[in-house]
Image (cartoon, rainbow, N blue to C red):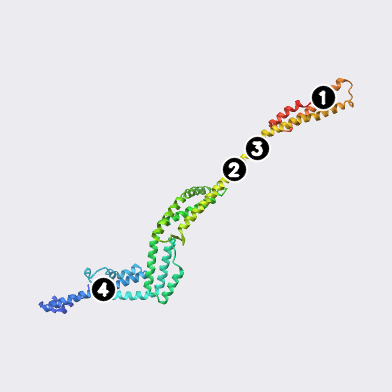
Amino acid sequence: MLGTDSSLIITKVHPSLNELSGLSKNISDSILEKLGSTVRSLEADKKARLEKLHQLGKSLTNLWNLMDTPQKDRARFSNVTALISLSSKDISTPGSLTLDIIQQAETEVRRLDQLKASKMKELFLRKQVDLEEICKRSHMEIPSRLEMESIMKLMNSGEIDHADLLTSMNKQITQAQEEASSRKAIMEKVEKWILARDEELWLEEYSRDDNRYSVSRGAHKNLRRAERARVMVNKIPALVDMLIAKTKSWEEERKKPFLYDEVPLFAMLEEYNLLRKERDEEKQRQREMKKVQNQVPVGQENLFVLRPSTSSKRLSDRSLNGGFNNATPVNKKSSLGIQQLGSTPINTPQQSISFLKKSKKEDHRKILSRSRFAFHPGDDSASVVSSFSGPFSP
């Protein structure tokens, strides 16, 4: 194990103990005591070398972890790091505690110490990027840039130990990973809620499009998307209630608010519920107003439906009155005709009577023709007026 020649050690104790010497063995008490002393010295040396390799192995491991040394570079000293967890009694592999191994480990530790000083800034920046990526993926609060810049100044001035700084960074990364793991279930629901909210906004814009049912390229795709969006939007209230419950439970357990991109998630959910309620109330008011507006034309149509009966009555009355009134001009024309008897050459009473009859027939035809063209043929009142206009005329 120590990498020494056992025959040389035995020969130092007494040459006769070496079988290659050809001498008869001397097993006197002094030789046996010397042998015992040599064994105890070798055991102490073994223990000292093992402790030295324990220290070197730990130093190598820390430096490797600080500088993120690749695994292939660590493999050269795997025999050293393997001894860290072993005690002196557990080691029996030949050559595992030689001086050459110790010297090689010490040389590597010195090399890494020199490399650490030049790469510490790069390592710190890399750890900082890792921490920010973890926070971004989980939408957690990212450490402030001012704080990181102040740490960099302390590191450059040598006022802070590099190993302690990286240890602190590793601790922050571990805490961030643990918190991200605790937020995972909530974040999955948040992503679904955000996706459903985006679809809700798209569906509102789509519903306001008057040409959404027109036959155009891609219209069927929008229809299918609208169907899927309605299903997602209908699930939003239950999803928000579940998120509120999970967020409250997480905040009570952690004793701090659940932040999403530096904004409390609980406040975001409450604000969404309030806006959704206001939007639903506004939609209800618009539907009621539209319902009232649709009822007004119906009432007007009823009025228009009732008017023909009343108007026909009025028209018939007017037409009947007109029939009586029209008698006056007929009588006037008849009187004019009678007055014209004096100027017309009529020799006998029979000729005068036939002349009056002929003038009455001509006036009667004129009244009938005016009554026919005064109204639409399909109007019942017109037919009534035309039927009554004859008898009432003289």
Residue 162 seen from this side: yes
Q: Which residue is drawn at 21% across and 75% down?
A: 44
Q: Residue at x 62, y 39 (%)?
A: 299
User: Helix or strand or loop: what does disc 4 sit on?
Assistant: helix
Between label 1 and label 2, give the one nearer the viewer: 2
| Disc number placed over residue 100 in the picture, else none | none
* Mark 1 vs mark 3, CA separation in Å: 46 Å
Q: In which quarter of the image is the C terminus?
A: top right
* Mark 2 vs mark 3, CA separation in Å: 16 Å
Q: Name the residue under label 4.
A: 51
* Mark 2 vs mark 4, CA separation in Å: 95 Å
Name the quadrant containing residue 254: bottom left
Q: Do the residues labelled 2 and 4 touch (CB within 8 Å)?
A: no
Front residue (pair 173, 278): 278
Judge from the rendering whether residue 155 lies leftward or rightward of residue 49; answer left or right. right
Residue 101: percent from the left, percent from the top?
27, 74
* Mark 1 vs mark 4, CA separation in Å: 154 Å
Q: Could you classify mark 3 by the number of other residues whose Cα lies within 10 Å: few (under 14), some (14-19), or many (20 or more)?
A: few
Q: In which quarter of the image is the N terminus?
A: bottom left
Q: Name the residue under label 1.
A: 358
Check disc 2 and give the amino acid type.
Answer: Asn
Question: Eyeballing the image, is 199 above or below 322?
Answer: below
Q: Name the residue under label 3.
A: 304
Name which of mark 1 and mark 4 comes first in the sequence.
4
| Disc number placed over residue 294 in the picture, else none | 2
User: Helix or strand or loop: what does disc 3 sit on?
Assistant: helix
